[in-house]
Image (spheres, rainbow, N blue to C red):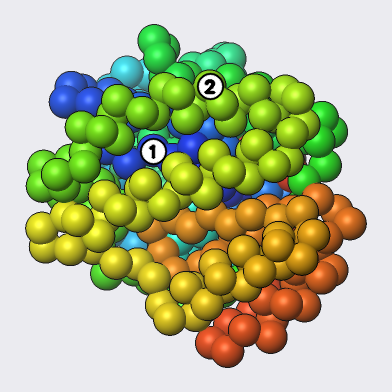
Amino acid sequence: MTTALAHPNIALVKYWGKQDKAGNMPATPNLSITLSELSTVTTIGDSDRFQFQLNGEPVDDPKVSALIAAMTENFNLPPLRIDSTNNFPTSAGLASSAAGFAALVTAVDAHCKLGMNPALRSEWARRGSASAARSICGGFVALVPPDWQAQSLAPAQHWPLEVVVAITRQEAKDVSSTEGMERSRITSPFYNQWLRSAGDDYAEASAAITERDFEKLAAIAELSCLKMHSLMLTSRPTLSYWTPASVACMDRVRELRSQGEAVFFTVDAGPQIKAVCLPESRAAVAKALADVPGVLEILCSPLGEGARIIND
Ligand code: 2P0
């Protein structure tokens, strides 16, 4: 048996739309931070047939089955039993698939002695779910052309940012990211502008991280997030992942920033708000978001490491 652990990541420059070719490659460069306090733990063992359990229940997940089928063909794998457990809500806009596929590929690689380097693990994780490519690395992570294998921009220690997550709904989302981004690609009138501006957004965010320029990162990360949500809102039929509490939390974050707290928000394909802040602002941000009506729970996390084996 082999056990791997991976953390979710939160994109600061978003991925929303794929290239029109095989390999599950994003259409635009994107960039994320990896969270240490949320994790997926995946154990692989030998079996007489393929079996997948998520949070203790047998699950028929077509994306997991497809990735295992592709890896089995490529590496001649034996049948495997896979047990995956998340310590956070699944499919609720907390990047459970990112942590899940990063842990899965890392565990399969080690269990079956495939000898992959991190770049190759990232590529296989990307085939499962493109954001999973980024969870192979820790700290600040880029997923960019031409290879679309995640690279570390800087380790977690480079800039000790903190993330305060405000949970406003626990249930799994109705429209998956895969389906939602395809709908936006085909129908949003803003999609071409999104493609054109993503390179500049990526360059600006990457420079802000190198320079540890919080205001610059705040401005570009909020812009990238709101551009992505504009694509969602202008899709036909429209897509909205927000709850009233999500909107109230964004307003509260803007208010806190105007009062001098070092904080910005980002929101993914779900109703949770991720407030990224400097350590000195974390307590004030957590308290303020906890007081917003409709916020059910607050999670706090510093930045974390990449996917790794935790026993063998
Ligand atoms: C991101 N998201 O960059 C963006 C922001 C959600 C919103 O990547 O189709 O589950 O499996 O490649 O990776 C979620 O999309 O989609 C995602 P697939 P994935 O984090």
| Position of residue 118 measured from the top left corner of the image (x, y, whole percent) | 58, 20
> Can you say which quadrant of the picture contains the C terminus?
top right
* Residue 245 as seen in the image, left or right of residue 173: right
> Can you say which quadrant of the picture contains the N terminus?
top right
- Rendered image quadrant of residue 252: bottom right
Residue under numbered circle 2: 203
- Rendered image quadrant of residue 159: top right
* Residue 128 as seen in the image, left or right of residue 214: left
In the image, farthest residue toward the top: 146
* Residue 254 as seen in the image, left or right of residue 243: right
* Mark 1–mark 2 distance (CA, rounded to whole Å): 14 Å
**Front-lying residue, 291 or 169:** 291
| Position of residue 244 measured from the top left corner of the image (x, y, whole percent) | 43, 81
**Front-lying residue, 168 or 217:** 217
Where disc 1 sits, the SS reads loop
Residue under numbered circle 1: 15
Residue at x 69% of width, y 81% of height: 290
- Disc 2 crowd rating (10 Å Cα; few below 14, some 14-19, many 20+) is some
* Residue 70 as seen in the image, left or right of residue 248: left
